[in-house]
């Protein structure tokens, strides 16, 4: 019998068999679930991507595939025309050319790409680096082209087309031309490109606010090509649809007069900054709005770094201490709260002197701008007596010279009325950049400066000085509400917006009647600060104001008013910054504007 042979491999296997059995362990349930979960997630991601590419993005990639073979040109839609309230055209669209670069076509160029860009840059007088920066920003998942130059000349268009490159596209375009750029620029604004895209939108003014209405829908023209890039057929895929027109409440002829009168008076005063607004107090329709310095909105790029910030719309974005323009509202508050009657009088020797609790030997003196003597509500408004409104606003403490103790409104009550008239809120006017006023008070001052609120602070804000700031538009809506028997209308520049009341104080008729009498006496009385308006062709009313700024080294001059006094059709505000002679410098402009409006519109 033959002896069984045993190989070396078998011997080794038998020796390790026991150990191998120990190594064959079952997979735990948690491990299996983890691996299965990861697999499901990966499978789900793949399926979701496939669904997206085949369904949601199918149209996009189909269009991209067609573009790779065919050439697509955008036919820009003309923006809607903007007119004044009488239908006068304020802007027009002039046919022109623009240049776009196609990134996908540039990427196809295996050689000569830099040479092509250099030629384009030379024709356009641009830097090659600027062109490359624009091209790099193009996201090929959103589009292949970017506009690199608008309003190119006919000679440039011919030279660019002579390059005969599918990457260089000279397209039809239009230039937005503003017919009176310096006169209407702060109302109309201007347009520009949205980054590198083919979209033109409004940047400021009504061009921005009503951009969707004005923009329109671009059309598309397709050039069908063969594999060699030869054009076989042209087809208009979709017609461009122009934007809708926009009619403004602005009176174009009146706007031009207001602008020229303001410009002329500023030149005579050797001043450059200010703003003027005119509106209908019954409807809130803005009839004219000017802001100086102005700018040419046909060439806005030249004003981006203007020293006096000419693009800044002072009418809606400027914040100013209102000066005595706030006194009619203080008078209304005092009458409503029963602090005074129209016949209550206070004596103004040219100042109000009160005890100094920190140094009794040196009393605090708050100045009036003149010695007015005994003044009641009407003469205090007409003369713009500071002492009267010091007392009404903050009262008189014990020990004051020439005055008995008196309890005034106090800062919290003043803030309550300022807020009711919207000083701390926007009006909602359909112009961009509206600012919100600032209402100072004890808590705010303590937090901001660490100092307590003193009676002198209330004296200051009661006459429109100190830290109180308001926009010119808000001051005019306050005045217009008084002129409109207590109904404050929302200001607007589009005739398509419906009249809307911001606030209704029509139950204040008795108080409003007394304040309106004081504003009429400001014009009618020979001591009134706006008496220069007395001989106008119709009865008007108003209020002058001077606000000290820059540590009392400069004065802003205000005037607000309305007419005809019995049934107002127009309310105006004039503000001259850094006026040499205080509020008197605003009145001549107001006179010219009010007289023109009577002669031409009433």
Image: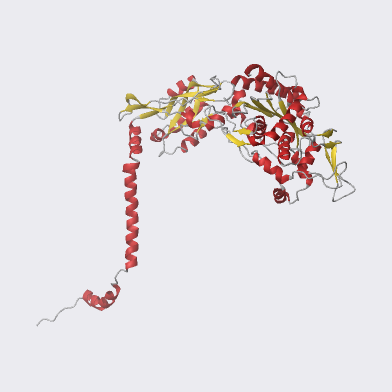
Q: Residue furthest top?
A: 599
314 vs 30, left or right, is right
Quarter assignment of residue 581: top right
Quarter assignment of residue 308: top right
Q: Position of residue 313 (x, y in %)?
A: 63, 32
Q: Quadrant of the C terminus?
A: top right
Q: Position of residue 342 (x, y in %)?
A: 76, 35
61 vs 295, left or right, is left
Residue at horizontal 87 percent and vertical 50 percent from the top: 359
Quarter assignment of residue 235: top left
- State how many labels appear: 0
Answer whether residue 118 is visible to the viewer in this image: no
Q: In terms of depth relative to the viewer, which is nearer, 485 or 439? A: 485
Q: Residue furthest left?
A: 1
Q: Residue furthest right?
A: 361
Q: Position of residue 64 (x, y in %)?
A: 35, 36
Q: Quadrant of the N terminus?
A: bottom left
Q: Position of residue 525 (x, y in %)?
A: 79, 25
539 vs 234, left or right, is right
Answer whether residue 72 is visible to the viewer in this image: yes
């Amino acid at each position: 019998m033959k002896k069984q042979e045993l190989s070396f491999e078998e011997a080794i296997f038998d020796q390790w068999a026991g150990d191998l059995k120990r190594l064959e362990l079952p997979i735990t349930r948690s491990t299996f679930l983890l691996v299965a979960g990861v697999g499901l997630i990966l499978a789900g991601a793949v399926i979701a991507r496939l669904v997206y590419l085949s369904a949601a993005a199918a149209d996009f990639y189909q269009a991209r595939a067609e573009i790779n073979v065919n050439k697509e040109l955008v036919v820009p839609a003309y923006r809607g025309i903007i007119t004044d309230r009488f239908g006068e055209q304020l802007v027009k669209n002039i046919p022109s050319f623009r240049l776009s670069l196609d990134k996908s076509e540039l990427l196809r160029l295996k050689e000569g790409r830099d040479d092509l860009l250099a030629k384009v840059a030379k024709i356009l007088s641009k830097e090659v680096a600027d062109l490359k920066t624009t091209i790099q920003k193009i996201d090929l998942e959103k589009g292949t082209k970017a506009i690199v130059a608008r309003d190119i000349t006919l000679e440039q268009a011919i030279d660019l087309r002579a390059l005969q490159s599918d990457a260089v596209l000279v397209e039809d375009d239009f230039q937005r031309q503003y017919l009176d750029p310096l006169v209407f620029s702060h109302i109309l604004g201007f347009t520009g490109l949205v980054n590198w895209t083919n979209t033109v939108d409004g940047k400021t003014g009504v061009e921005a606010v009503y951009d969707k209405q004005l923009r329109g829908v671009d059309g598309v023209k397709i050039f069908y090509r063969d594999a060699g890039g030869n054009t076989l057929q042209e087809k208009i895929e979709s017609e461009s649809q122009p934007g809708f027109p926009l009619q403004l409440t602005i009176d174009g002829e009146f706007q031009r007069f207001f602008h020229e009168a303001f410009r002329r008076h500023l030149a005579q005063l050797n001043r450059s900054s200010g703003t003027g607004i005119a509106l209908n107090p019954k409807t809130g329709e803005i009839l004219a709005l000017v802001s100086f310095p102005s700018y040419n909105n046909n060439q806005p790029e030249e004003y981006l770094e203007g020293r006096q910030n000419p693009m800044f719309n002072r009418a809606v974005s400027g914040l100013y201490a209102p000066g005595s323009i706030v006194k009619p509202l203080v008078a209304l508050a005092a009458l409503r709260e029963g602090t005074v009657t129209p016949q209550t009088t206070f004596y103004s020797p040219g100042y109000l002197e009160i005890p100094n609790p920190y140094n009794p030997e040196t009393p605090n003196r708050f100045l009036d701008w003149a010695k007015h003597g005994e003044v009641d509500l009407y003469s205090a408004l007409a003369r713009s007596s500071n002492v009267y409104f010091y007392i009404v606003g903050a009262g008189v403490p014990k020990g004051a010279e020439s005055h008995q103790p008196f309890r005034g409104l106090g800062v919290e009550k003043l803030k309550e009325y300022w807020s009711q008239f919207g000083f701390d809120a926007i009006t909602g006017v359909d112009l961009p950049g509206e600012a919100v006023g600032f209402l100072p008070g004890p808590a705010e001052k303590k937090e901001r400066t660490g100092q307590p609120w003193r009676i002198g602070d209330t004296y200051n804000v009661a006459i429109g000085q100190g830290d109180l700031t308001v926009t010119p538009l808000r001051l005019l809506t306050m005045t217009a509400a008084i002129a409109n028997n207590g109904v404050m209308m929302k200001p607007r520049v589009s005739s398509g917006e419906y009249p809307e009341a911001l606030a209704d104080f029509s139950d204040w008729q008795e108080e409003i009647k007394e304040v309106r009498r004081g504003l009429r006496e400001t014009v009618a009385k020979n001591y009134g600060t706006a008496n220069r308006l007395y001989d106008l062709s119709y009865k008007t009313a108003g209020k002058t104001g001077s606000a000290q700024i820059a540590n009392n080294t400069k004065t802003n001059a205000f005037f607000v008013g309305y007419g005809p006094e019995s049934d107002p059709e127009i309310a105006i505000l004039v503000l001259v910054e850094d006026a040499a002679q205080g509020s008197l410098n605003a009145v001549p402009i107001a006179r010219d504007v009010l007289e023109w409006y009577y002669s031409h519109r009433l």
